[in-house]
Amino acid sequence: MSRVPVRVIRAAECRRMPWKNGGGETIEIAVHPEGAGLEDFDWRLSAARVATDGPFSTFPGVDRTLAILEGVGLELRVGEDAPVLLRRETLPYAFPADEPTEAQLLEGPITDLNVMTRRGRIVHTVQRLDVEGRLQLALNGEVALIFCAVGTLQIEAGPTLGARDCALIQPACDGLSIAADQGTIVYLIEIRSTTS
């Protein structure tokens, strides 16, 4: 079995920083280019605790996908669209990050997972996977990130991820085998440039 280029990002190593609008704190899991700020990243993966109702930060020219990791959930209103209810069990929700966005908590604070990519240069997909036993992933992006939300995950011939750990695979391989016990929840994020 060939080795794949996996970089493990442990939850304890991630950088904490204020929201762009100052309304809370975010945990930056991975960003490209490495060391990029909020104004000049190509792509970014982060998690944030939302403790009060209010507006999301706006990011001009950025597309965003949001998933609920912890807590009951929230109601999200993006621009003039009808409000959307997001809970832990719902699929990740994609929306433009430059539209005015308001969040209302359903029952107390939540923690969310955010994926953002620079529109016109980079695109992304996010899948929520309930893993039990062994699973073969077909990877299609130039970069793949595997975020372990709940439980522990074994990556083929490689590391074990604990809760809130992430594996960065770059360049992404064609396929990857993962294994986990019942109850493990994983988010697979795939990223590619629009010129590829």
Image (cartoon, rainbow, N blue to C red):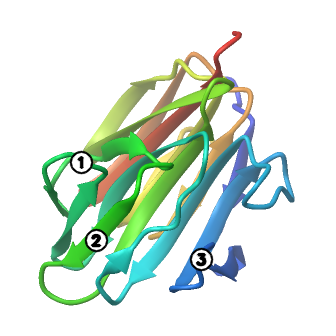
Tell me if I can see residue 150 in this picture: yes
Q: Looking at the rendering, in which quadrant would you find the N terminus? A: top right
**Relative to the observer, which residue lies in front, 167 or 51?**
51
In the displayed structure, does residue 80 sit left or right of residue 62? left
| Residue at 29% across, 44% down | 129
Q: Residue furthest front?
A: 80
| Residue at 73% across, 33% down | 170
Q: Earlier in the sequence, mark 2 or mark 1?
A: 1
User: How many marks can you see?
Assistant: 3
| SS type, badge 1 | loop
In the displayed structure, does residue 131 sit left or right of residue 56? left
> Where is mark 3, residue-wise?
19
| SS type, badge 2 | strand
> Where is mark 2, residue-wise?
103
Residue 85, quarter of the rendered image? bottom left
Spot occupied by residue 16 in the image (x, y as percentages of width and height): 67, 81
Residue 143, quarter of the rendered image? top right
CA gap, disc 2 and disc 1: 14 Å
Neighbourhood count class around disc 2 (C-alpha, 10 Å): few under 14, some 14–19, many 20 upward: many
Which amino acid type corresponds to the residue marked 2 in the rendered image?
Answer: Ala
Neighbourhood count class around disc 3 (C-alpha, 10 Å): few under 14, some 14–19, many 20 upward: some
Q: Earlier in the sequence, mark 3 or mark 1?
A: 3
